[in-house]
Each structure stands twice: as C-alpha cells, then as structure tokens.
Image: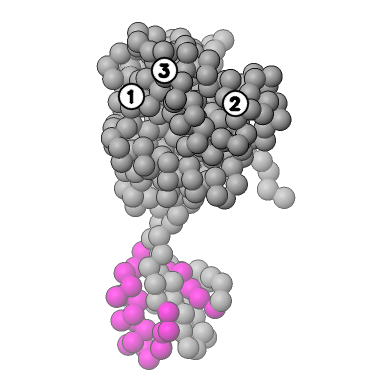
Amino acid sequence: MITVEGLTKEYGGTRVVDGLGFEVRPGVVTGFLGPNGAGKSTTMRLILGLERPSAGRTLIDGRPYAELDAPLRRVGALLDPHALHGGRTARGHLRWLAASNALPRRRVEEVLDQVGLSDAADRRIRAFSLGMRQRLGVAAALIGDPPVLMLDEPVNGLDPEGIRWIRALLRGLAAEGRAVLASSHLMSEMALTADHLVVIGRGRLLADAATTDFIDRHGRTRIRVRAVDPDALASLIGRSGLDARRADGGAWEVTGAAPEEVAALAAAEGVVLYEIAVQQDSLEEAFLRMTADSVEYRAVAA
C-alpha cells in the first residue's frame, strides 16, 4: 500500500506539489492523472525517495522508501525508460539489479520472458526502440516480485499489441492483490485499465474516486434521437424547449431530460423515432471538463 500525506514540494519558491494526500490500495489499479506540469512525476519521485519533500511524507506499507530492506522486493517502479546504460545488454542490466537486492539469477530470465525480450536479451540497450526500453523498464520493476508497482506512462512507445499486453499485465498484478499506481495521458486506456483514479492539477488533489464514479460525476449524460422525419423532429424540439443540439447523421442530442420524457413527447406529436439512446461522456471528456482550469500549457486552436 502507498500512503501520501500532506505532500508538498517547492523548487525555488514555486510549489509543484501542494498538500497532496491519497492512498493506493492493494488489489486495485489506480490511475494517476493530471495535465502536463500537474506534478505527477514529481510525486512519484517523492514516493521513491528520489526527491525530498518540503513538507508531508510518503509511505510504502507504512515505511518510508529509504527504510525498506531490499526495496526491489517491496516496490517496483518504471519512471524513465531512457534512464538506462546504453552500453549494457538487457540481461546485464537486469543481472546487476538482481545482484543489488540478492535476488536469484533465475528471476532475470523469468522477467525477460514475461515482457517478451528473451530474444533480445543480449543486445545493447542503445539499439533498443522506445517500446523495447519500456518493456525492459517493466521487467526491472517486476524483478523483485514486489507487492507494490509504480509505472509512469507505461504504454508510451508501445504498439497496439504492447498496449494490450500492459493492460492485461496491470490488471493481472492487481488481481493478485498488489497495489498498482500507473500514470498515463491515454484516457481511453485508463478507462479500460484503472479501477480507481487520483487526479491532480497544479500539484493539488482534484479527485480521488472510482473510475465509474468520476465519469458519472464529471461527465455529461445526453439522449441521442433520430426520427423518420427529421424536419418534424426539429420542429418538435423547437416547440418543446428541450436543451438540444444537432448532431451528425441528422440526429439531435438532448441533455437534461430522461429518454422516457423524450419518447413521450415524440409519441404525443406523432413523430416516429427510429433511434433513441443514452450516451455518457468518455473518461477523456470528463477529465478535460474537470481539469479545464488546471491546464498550465494550452495551445491556441487553429
């Protein structure tokens, strides 16, 4: 379990993490979300003792990372796939990690096979693609068979097969009772992978909720309707005062009304509907709406 309490970090008077507090529980994939510059990577570095907090603390199973014996057996992390010695081979990189924490050599071969790098084990890391480096970083995180996993943008650089693999891996690790914290900007993937979300903006906690609850709370529900006679439907909507807007394919999207209400209005006016469906915002739409005021870097639309 990961515990973050009142975590604050300042650089030169600029506060990049501000009183942050949350928990990452075992048996759950927790998605760590936020706009660029929100403080996600800094928070992960603070949890792993790579930075010292200005205030607050972080604990792994009730202890600071620096106090863990054989830390690779307690927590595995992937922060930067480029932070690897290019002159080493994949097998050599994992062997020195195993030796540093008194792990058996067989774990090197096991994790190489688990991430699909057995055939490339003796190649120099400098020749690896970004996706291969990501897989090697995951192997390093798994080598100690830890109960806690932390991965920063684990799908970055992976092809579709790799993305599907990492999704199944994270969910499988959580199903084994491990605590998994994963950050990503790929919202569609987080919607499929994360059971719980921690969302931050400008270093502050914005949301700490189950994924479904977050979408229900910050997303919009709308009713999509289409009729045999589009003009008759447009006239009905104009007279009814429904909050609606035109959509693709001659459809209308209605908000603030139940589907039964829309269907009853159409029936009363003799408007024949051949589509009526409830649509819910995606995680991406809910996230963008919720973090709109916390975006630090915003491009001007063309």
* Image quarter hosting the N terminus: top left
Which mark is nearer the camera, 1 or 3? 3
Determine whether, in the image, residue 204 is placed left or right of residue 292: left
Q: Which residue is mark 2?
A: 90
* Number of residues whose C-alpha sits closer than 10 Å to that of mark 2, classed few (under 14), some (14–19) or many (20 or more): many
Q: Which residue is mark 1?
A: 2
Residue 225: image quadrant is bottom left
Disc sitting over residue 80 in the figure: none
Judge whether residue 264 is colored magenta: yes
Q: Write the start and end of the magenta stretch as one range.
A: 250-275
Query: Residue shown at 61%/21% (left/top)?
Result: 84
Query: Residue shown at 46%/21% (left/top)?
Result: 105
Residue type highlighted by circle 1: Ile
SS at circle 2: helix
Q: Which residue is mark 3?
A: 103
Observer-nearest of 76 and 239: 76
Query: Residue shown at 35%/20% (left/top)?
Result: 74
